[in-house]
Image (spheres, rainbow, N blue to C red):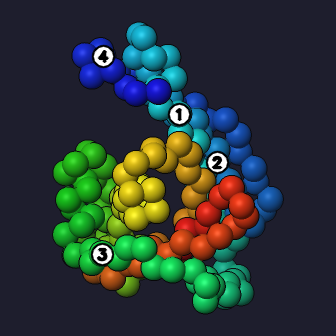
Amino acid sequence: CPIPVDEPLTVEAQLVSVDDNGQRAVLTQRVVTSTPSAPEALVAELFVFVPLAKGEKRAKKAPVVVPLDAREVAFWRVGDSAGLDFALLTGDFNPIHWIGPYARAAGFRNTILHGFGTLARAVEGVHRAVYMGAAPVTGVEARFLKPLVLPARVGLYVGELDGARRKVW
């Protein structure tokens, strides 16, 4: 439902579960944004993966491959300042998103774009390219497979998953 613009917002977060298998922990959080007339105007479930195993070399994951029949529906260039831009917009000033030396000290090649910044671009791209702005995107399920190191050229690809849903890469 639309979020009323003339009412105060309330945001509540809850740690729903912790799944620890000794190698990694998965924390599930539920964040609800509400107003007096829209008690669950926006609900988000967040999953945080925390690696626990130390000292072991991890097996490299196979790269994500976009199928040949998928089509590129959008692309954009994301500059070095995208992490700081997102921080200024949202108030999330995690330094791995906007301070290069800090990001490198944390093990990244450079700063990385915030996951929600990546998700917002993807949802907007799907909304414009696939639905041409005519129908709202009513649900999104996303998995973040690897960080988006800045600067970057990002492609958005769409393929058929089944008759009712599409898969986006």
Comparing labels 1 and 2, the label whose residue is closer to the camera:
1
Q: Secondary structure at mark 3?
A: strand
Name the kind of residue labelled 4 in the image: Pro
Q: Which residue is mark 1?
A: 43
Q: Which residue is mark 2?
A: 27
Residue 9 visible in the snapshot: yes
Residue shown at 60%/53% (left/top)? Answer: 141
Q: Which residue is mark 3?
A: 76
Q: Earlier in the sequence, mark 1 or mark 3?
A: 1
> Whole-Å distance between the Cαs marked 4 and 3?
35 Å
Name the kind of residue labelled 2 in the image: Leu
Q: Earlier in the sequence, mark 4 or mark 2?
A: 4
Residue 103 visible in the snapshot: no
Q: Residues within 10 Å of mark 2 (few under 14, many from 20)?
A: some
> Whole-Å distance between the Cαs marked 1 and 3?
28 Å
> Whole-Å distance between the Cαs marked 4 and 2?
29 Å
Q: Secondary structure at mark 4?
A: loop
